Image: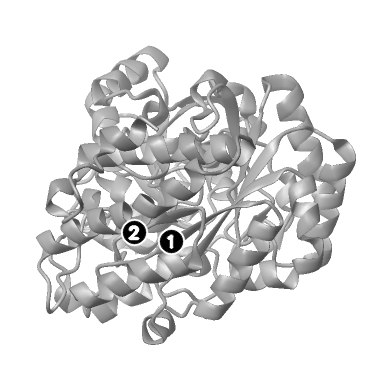
Amino acid sequence: MSKILFVTAPYHCWGVQVVGKWPPLHLAYLAGAALEAGHEARIFDAMNKGLAFEDIRQEIKRFQPDFVMTLDYLPVTGAISTATVPDALRILDVAKEVNPAIVTLLGGPHPTFMFNEILEDGKNHVDYILKGEPEQTLKQLLAAIPDGKGKDVKGIAYREGGEVVSNTNQPHIVELDSLSAAWHLLDWDDYQYRVAPGGRMASILTSRGCDMECAFCSQRMFWREDWRCRKPENVVEEMAHLIETYNIGFFTLIDAYPTKHRDRWELFLDLLIERKFGVQLLIETRVEDIIRDADILHKYAEAGIIHIYIGAESADKDTLNSLNKGTSFEQNKQALDLCREAGIITEASFMIGFPNETWDSIDSTIESAKYLNPDIAVFPVVTPMPFTPIHADMKDRIRVWDYSKYNLVTPIVEPFEMTMDEITQALGTCYMKFYTEKVQEIVALEDGFKRRYMMSAFKLMMKDHGKHFDFSASGMPMHFTTDAFVSY
């Protein structure tokens, strides 16, 4: 029996971490696989505990593991996983500094595609990279390495004799319900949904994969165009276990595409309605499915879905086409209106910072966001991850190569007609101009769940946003300061 320590990168940035702390479900599944294979496992969630590398060093000394593993991701979908790569690699450096005999393992989207870059110079202390879906690969590695056969395992990359070796892919797990998350290894007091203080948050998986072709996303490539799902009955039973055992009040579905099959999705909703858990759910999905489900959106609300995120991205048809979203501005409007009618809070993203960005296009994005009128708007800076299709299209305009900056907040691409500093300024302008009007709309609502929820979310977003951006450069009236917003 071996001992394996799973560690999250101590990475922090403005974004999803502002409104809550999500449990590292990916590591919980890996720990479950290790336990199932008869090993001793521990999860050290440095990210959500707000700890540093020295804390990780001390934990490694205490536990004395045979293996240390980390992934390059932020909780939820892992959409900005590349930003955590430097910290993930530093974790493995620390492990080798504590004990050179520790076997170091790295997984996640970025290492899956960029294993050559990580391994080629031999400077990174990575013994094995687990490519793609990691649970079966991990089990096999833990069994093979003590026998000197680790390099025979499918689904890995490693360095040997100055060369990088990439083995053939591991077959995907056919039955996702065969996976078991090691929930008991998590410190549940760490996972709070800050929008509703005191509400413990759990992440849950109902499917893996996506067959959409969004040019900025790795989901389709990482899962090799494969979409698999769990049985709704099993998902609901797992939710019941988490509610009863850990007093969970909020669930985030981390699926990239949970609503793909309507019959399965409606069954899931019906089961939740039947069980009357009294919990609330946050999901991400595609606008065409919301439109498809117009006649059952009441079930979304009855099942506890309070918050839906969609990627609107742009009102410009050429930009949407270049992103391969497969949706239209008109569809975005229809879906958001339908959700509003169903009483579901909506969040939509609008990208900025494209190579062809101008101040006129920034103004157009702001006006589009106002017209679509989601309850919450976010404005991610376009970030061409090095393994996505848009990277090749934008490579000549990329000016930042420090992966820790690939966080959807820092400008990476220099537009032809704007400076990088102007994109940062534009980001502040987008938020302030949208929320100047939105906050007045929400303040005017009668007191109730939506008003309280929205004001809590706004305060968190804007208070933290003000620490990272200079709004004085945005051209906004000085009377609308972050402090004034928070005082509502």
Left or right of residue 402, residue 433 in this image: right
| First of labels 1, 2 by sequence position | 1
| Location of residue 104 with respect to 78 vertically, above or below | above
Q: Nearer the viewer, residue 269 or 182?
A: 269
Q: Please name the residue shown 67% across and 21% down the image.
A: 246
Say what amino acid the circle numbered 1 marks: Ser
Q: Please name the residue shown 51% across and 35% down the image.
A: 22
Q: Residue lying furthest right in this view?
A: 274
Residue 253's x, y, as percent? Answer: 62, 47
Label 1, secondary structure: give it.
Answer: strand
Say what amino acid the circle numbered 2 marks: Pro
* Image quarter of residue 421: bottom left
Mark 2 nearby-residue class (10 Å; few <14, some 14–19, many ≥20): some
Q: Nearer the viewer, residue 258 or 475?
A: 475
Read off the residue under disc 2.
380
* Residue 91 can be seen in this image: no
| Location of residue 272 with respect to 94 vertically, above or below | below
Left or right of residue 13, residue 325 in this image: right
| Location of residue 233 with respect to 119 vertically, above or below | above
Read off the residue under disc 1.
349
Left or right of residue 279, residue 71 in this image: left
Q: Residue lying furthest top in this view?
A: 62
* Image quarter of residue 117: bottom left
Q: Please name the residue shown 52% across and 27% down the image.
A: 191
Q: State the quadrant of the N terminus.
A: top right
Q: Nearer the viewer, residue 437 or 169?
A: 437
Gap in angstroms between the C-alphas marked 1 and 2? 7 Å
Q: How is the image coloured?
A: one colour
Q: Nearer the viewer, residue 378 or 124?
A: 378
Label 2, secondary structure: give it.
Answer: loop
Left or right of residue 456, residue 92 in this image: left
* Residue 78 can be seen in this image: yes
